[in-house]
């Protein structure tokens, strides 16, 4: 069993629940402290320590880190793209200040490692749409993307200036069944499964040919752990790595679901999230992640759909 003591912030969210449970398997239940603003998630109950925490309260966070002898922090608390557009100043404040609190405490306490996720949302309408490269035009137009891009610059700054070992991935849209999504533009690709099973029909808030980069949660969790366990010299990107797995449109995922549920039908009614999606890449070039620390996704669209429908 490894000796690290880990704090997961935002542990009750879509990624947090599954990441916390996986980290507990690797590092031991008592060595992974879960924390969130919300009440403890049902799936976390009884699996290890849980602390109620507002990451915006730097003093409380600092006390928690010292009291639990924390050596690594995974910061997952954030306001996502669709929710962010409803209250841009709040999204900026929470997404930025949470990261600055964590980076600063990591510097002061000499923590071993920090993990903070970025997103494909850092790219904007002027970035190349197909197989978007790691280094290219980055002009995000959503407040979520702007905060992720600024966060990436802060991560690189804290690494270069203070030696904080902070690592990051630009996740694509994540698809999962254990914990509900938290207000993103890619959430349609989760809603569609629930509606297909319960109602046999779904009205999608994106148009049928809106391609976006996507990933199944087991791949995202494995990528996160592989990045965090990679030896330091292998990490050449200190802002955030492009990360890819699959790319599909609402029409394509609907067709794949129809293979399992033949009477499923989909209709389309775009809302404000269409504009957000239209500014993002259709697919991602993740060659640096593959070269530096051996990233390779396991799930494509058919394999993901089969697994989702089996588990929901
Ligand atoms: P989520 O919204 O499902 O979970 C975030 C969690 O943070 C929630 O449980 C929320 O209660 C908690 N939280 C919010 N404010 C907090 C605060 N002040 N103090 C403590 N906890 C607080 O989000 P997620 O989908 O799990 O995303 C986690 C991270 O991954 C975010 O940074 C997000 O931007 C990034 N990301 C997610 C996706 C995706 O598709 N889910 C894609 C790209 C990047
Ligand atoms: N899935 C996220 C969102 O739609 C992308 O970061 O907000």
Image (cartoon, helix red, strand yellow):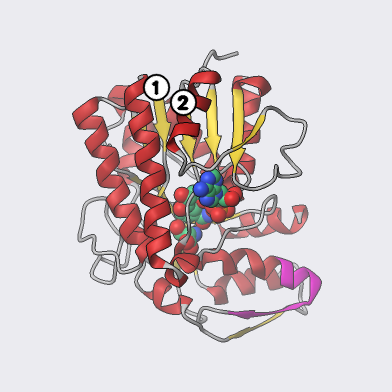
- For the N terminus, the image quarter is top right
Residue 51 at what x, y percent from top left? Answer: 63, 33
Horizontal and vertical percent for residue 280?
36, 67
Q: Secondary structure at mark 1?
A: loop
Q: Residues within 10 Å of mark 1 (few under 14, many from 20)?
A: some
Residue lying furthest right: 198
Which residue is painted at 53% across and 30% down in the image?
Answer: 7
Q: Which residue matches tag 2? A: 72
Quadrant of res 161: top left
Q: Quadrant of residue 115?
A: top left
- Taking the magenta stretch, the answer to whether it contains residue 199 is yes
- Whether residue 206 appears in magenta in the rendering, the answer is no
Question: Nearest the camera: 221 or 288?
Answer: 221
Magenta segment = 194-204
Q: CA distance from mark 2 to mark 1?
A: 6 Å
Vertical comparison of 49 with 178: above or below: above
Closer-to-camera residue (266/257): 266
Q: Are marks 2 and 1 in contact (CB under 8 Å)?
A: yes
- 64 lies above or below 276: above
The numbered disc on residue 218 is: none
> Is residue 284 rendered to the left or right of residue 218?
left
Question: Is residue 95 in sight in this rendering?
Answer: yes
**Is label 2 within 8 A of ligand 1 (CB to nearest ligand atom)?**
no
Q: Is residue 198 left or right of residue 180?
A: right
Tell me if residue 169 can be seen.
Answer: no
Residue at 40% from the left image edge and 52% from the top image edge: 95
Q: Which residue is mark 1?
A: 111
Q: Secondary structure at mark 2?
A: strand
Q: Residue at x 56, y 77 (%)?
A: 251
Q: Residues within 10 Å of mark 2 (few under 14, many from 20)?
A: many
């Amino acid at each position: 069993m490894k000796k690290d003591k880990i704090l997961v912030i935002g542990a009750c969210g879509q990624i947090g629940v599954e990441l916390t449970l996986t980290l507990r398997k690797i590092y031991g239940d008592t060595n992974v402290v879960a924390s969130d603003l919300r009440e403890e998630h049902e799936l976390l109950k009884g699996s290890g320590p849980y602390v109620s925490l507002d990451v915006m309260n730097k003093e409380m966070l600092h006390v928690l880190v010292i009291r639990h002898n924390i050596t690594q922090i995974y910061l997952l608390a954030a306001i996502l793209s669709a929710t962010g557009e409803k209250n841009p100043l709040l999204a900026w404040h929470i997404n930025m200040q949470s990261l600055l609190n964590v980076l600063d405490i990591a510097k002061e306490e000499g923590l071993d490692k920090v993990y903070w996720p970025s997103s494909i949302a850092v790219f904007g309408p002027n970035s190349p749409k197909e197989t978007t490269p790691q280094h290219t035009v980055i002009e995000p137009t959503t407040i979520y993307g702007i905060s992720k891009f600024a966060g990436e610059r802060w991560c690189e700054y804290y690494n270069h200036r203070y030696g904080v070992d902070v690592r990051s991935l630009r996740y694509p849209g994540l698809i999962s069944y254990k914990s509900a999504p938290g207000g993103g533009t890619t959430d349609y690709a989760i809603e569609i499964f629930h509606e297909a099973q319960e109602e046999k029909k779904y009205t999608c808030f994106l148009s049928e040919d809106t391609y976006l980069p996507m990933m199944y949660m087991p791949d995202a969790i494995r990528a996160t752990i592989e990045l965090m366990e990679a030896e330091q010299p292998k990490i050449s990107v200190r802002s955030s790595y492009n990360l890819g797995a699959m790319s599909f449109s609402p029409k394509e995922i609907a067709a794949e679901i129809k293979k399992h549920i033949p009477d499923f039908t989909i209709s389309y009614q775009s809302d404000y999230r269409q504009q957000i999606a239209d500014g993002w890449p259709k697919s991602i070039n993740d060659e640096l992640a593959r070269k530096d620390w051996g990233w390779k996704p396991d799930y494509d669209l058919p394999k993901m759909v089969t697994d989702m429908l089996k588990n929901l």
